Image (cartoon, helix red, strand yellow):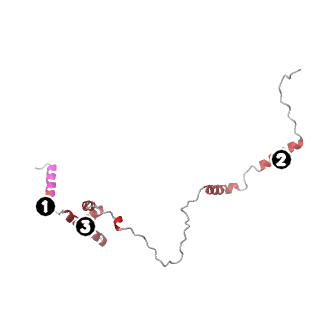
Amino acid sequence: MKQPTSKRPAKARRKTREELNQEGRERKRQKKHSGHAPGSRASGAAADAKNARSGQKKDPRIGSKTPIPLGVTEAPVTKQQKPKSEKKPMLSPQAELDMLENDERLDGLLERLEEGETLSKTDQEWVDAKLDRIDELMQQLGLSWDDEDEEEDENRGDDLMRLLKGGN
């Protein structure tokens, strides 16, 4: 028994002319359909945008489904009002007085009054109301305006100025 010396694969069968022609037609058909659709250069961006929109969910807040009456309704619409206690928290008299004393708008308007300017009617009414409220709070707390204290404060200021300037 003779053993073959080399292991070669069996020869492939040659294709006939008809088979080669058929394969060529298939390749041509695939090549013909492999390109882009006609007009894709002009409409490609619009098609991409449509595909992107369809993939996203719509915002549920847009477009309410509740019916809206188009005619005049007989019943007037009433708004619910909050109780007054919820609108403005109650402050202690001392806290309210501190808040009024540190009010920037009030300070600015009082400075304008001291300079001799006349305020508009609404501003003047607002300043009067705030000053009245400050007086009420001071009476509740037992505080009073002391002219003596103001003079002492001014004298202290003068003393400090003398000391700073190097006087006696």
> Foreground residue, 72 or 168?
72
Q: Residues within 10 Å of mark 1 (few under 14, many from 20)?
A: few
Residue at position x 13%, y 61% from top?
148
> Answer yes or no: do the residues labelled 3 and 1 have beta carbons within 8 Å?
no
Q: Helix or strand or loop: what does disc 2 sit on?
A: helix
- Magenta span: chief secondary structure: helix
Q: Which residues are magenta?
A: 153-165
Toward the viewer: 152 or 138?
138
Horizontally, residue 87 falls left or right of residue 19, namely left
What residue did someone put label 1 on?
148
User: Identity of the amino acid at label 1?
Assistant: Glu
Q: Quadrant of residue 17?
A: top right
* Label whose residue precedes the other's in the sequence (1 or 2): 2
Which badge, 3 or 1, comes first in the chain's sequence? Answer: 3
Residue 50 in sight here = yes
As displayed, is residue 149 above or below residue 6? below
Sequence-first disc among 2 and 3: 2
The image quadrant that residue 106 belongs to is bottom left
Give how far apart the Cα atoms at labels 3 and 1 are. 23 Å
Type of the residue with mark 2: Arg
The residue that label 3 is drawn on is 133
Give the side of residue 107 with respect to residue 148, left or right.
Answer: right
Label 2, on which residue? 25
Does the magenta portion include 118?
A: no
Q: Is residue 114 visible in this depiction of the protein?
A: no
For mark 1, give the secondary structure.
helix
- The stretch drawn in magenta includes residue 162: yes
Mark 3 vs mark 1, foreground winner is 3
Q: Is residue 121 above or below residue 13?
A: below
For the residues labelled 1 and 2, the Cα–Cα distance comes to 116 Å
- Image position of 86 (left or right of 144): right
What percent of the width, then of the height, locates residue 114? 23, 65
